[in-house]
Image (cartoon, rainbow, N blue to C red):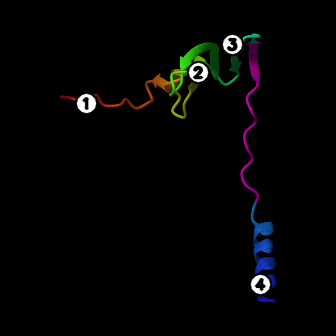
Amino acid sequence: MKMIIVALAVVAVVAAAPAGKEDPPQPQILRSEFDQKPDGSYSYSYETENGINIQENGEIKQALDEENKPHDVVVVRGSYSYTNDQGKLESITYYADETGFHAEGESIPKVPVARR
């Protein structure tokens, strides 16, 4: 019986809680392009009214796996930019291949170079 009362009390508190702040309206997409090729390669880009710009290309490449057997991988290259909370334009470029994801940009911390 105590369990039911506790459960009802929790439901009452949650129901009485003030509604959260409404999410701002989503920015409109000004431009959007996508091109998929039969071989698996592709390109896409889009731009929004709040200044977000994204472009990416993917192409098929043969790579060797751990057993030195060839297999296809998608190599991705792209970039995006947006205005951060402080009003500064942030631009990031990246690529991803069989070695992983690699990004560069002013806001991305640099890995220190080991000195010998």
SS at badge 3: loop
Q: CA distance from mark 2 to mark 4?
A: 52 Å
**Mark 4 nearby-residue class (10 Å; few <14, some 14–19, many ≥20):** few
Disc assigned to residue 3: 4
| Type of amino acid at the residue the image marks with label 4 | Met
Between residues 97 and 48, which one lies in front from this camera angle? 97
Q: Residue at x 53, y 25 (%)?
A: 65
Q: Earlier in the sequence, mark 4 or mark 1?
A: 4
Q: Which residue is mark 1?
A: 114
**Mark 3 nearby-residue class (10 Å; few <14, some 14–19, many ≥20):** some
Q: Which residue is mark 2?
A: 80
SS at badge 4: helix
| Type of amino acid at the residue the image marks with label 2 | Tyr
Q: x, y percentage for residue 62?
A: 58, 14
| Type of amino acid at the residue the image marks with label 3 | Ser
68 lies left or right of 10: left
SS at badge 2: strand
Q: Which residue is mark 3?
A: 41
The answer to the question of whether label 2 and label 3 lie on touching residues, with beta carbons closer than 8 A, is no
